[in-house]
Amino acid sequence: MTQLIVYSAADPATVLLDTTDFDTIVREIAPAGATLERWKAATPLAAEATSEDILDAYKPQLDRLKSERGYVNADVIHVRPGNPNWPTLRQKFLSEHTHDEDEVRFFVEGSGAFYLHVGDKVYQVVGTADDLLSVPQGTKHWFDGGSEGNFTVIRLFNDPKGWIAHYTGDTIADGVPNYEAA
């Protein structure tokens, strides 16, 4: 279930808002420049769908975003429980960072949480199947897919080199509750 929890950055034990209302989530993250959309596949996806099948199923939406925002590359990432690389990847993503381009992720299946550190607040946006989240360029943030990691996402990039993080060195992510999938 898509969810937004807003924490005080000064005291992450203080929850300022906790909602699963999609329209409220869209409205609350908009001042940070973040967007949230819901997509449906143009064609049904089989359980064993390949990355190519997934990209084809969402081609109309991907083409629209590429045209509107200049993205040049899209790929698919699959993370499953038991992946021996997940603990290392998770630690990399849990450190607050920024990017020189928007970070755009569409959840095909599973879930994960993006944490946006904006001013005196931290916005934890839990994305689930059919959610597209766009975090604006330069926004301090981190990602948590949970201790096991269980998601398939489409990533969109302006830079053909892909995901390039600029770590802030801030330890704020250490004080905010980690995400655990239900």
Image (cartoon, rainbow, N blue to C red):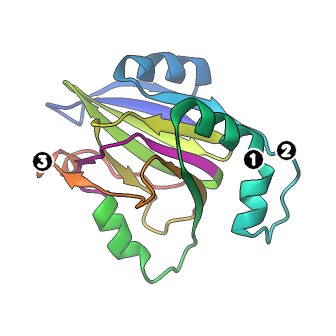
* Inter-mark Cα distance, 1 to 2: 8 Å
User: Which residue, given by chain and number where applicable, does mark 1 sit on?
Assistant: 59
Callout 3 secondary element? loop
- Say if residue 1 shows up in the picture: no
Any magenta on residue 105? yes
- How busy is the neighbourhood of tag 2: few (under 14 within 10 Å), some, or many (20 plus)? few
* Tag 1: amino acid: Lys
Q: Identify the residue at horizontal 29%, vertical 35% (top origin).
A: 139
Residue under label 3: 170
Segment colored magenta: 94-107
Q: Amino acid at mark 2?
A: Ala
Q: For the residue labelled by badge 1, is the local secondary structure a helix, a strand or a loop?
A: helix
Q: Nearer the viewer, mark 1 or mark 2?
A: 1
Q: Please name the residue that numbered disc 2 is placed on.
A: 42
Question: Could you tell which of marks 1 and 2 lies nearer the N-terminus?
Answer: 2
Position of residue 85 measured from the top left corner of the image (x, y, whole percent) = 42, 79
Where does residue 42 sit, x and y in percent of width and height? 85, 44
Question: Quick one: 70 or 147, which is closer to the camera?
Answer: 70
- Helix, strand or loop at label 2? It is loop
CA distance separating discs 1 and 3: 37 Å
Instruction: Specify which label sits upstream in the sequence, 3 or 2.
Output: 2
**Residue 27 against residue 104 in the figure, above or below:** above
Contact (Cβ within 8 Å) of mark 1 with mark 2: yes
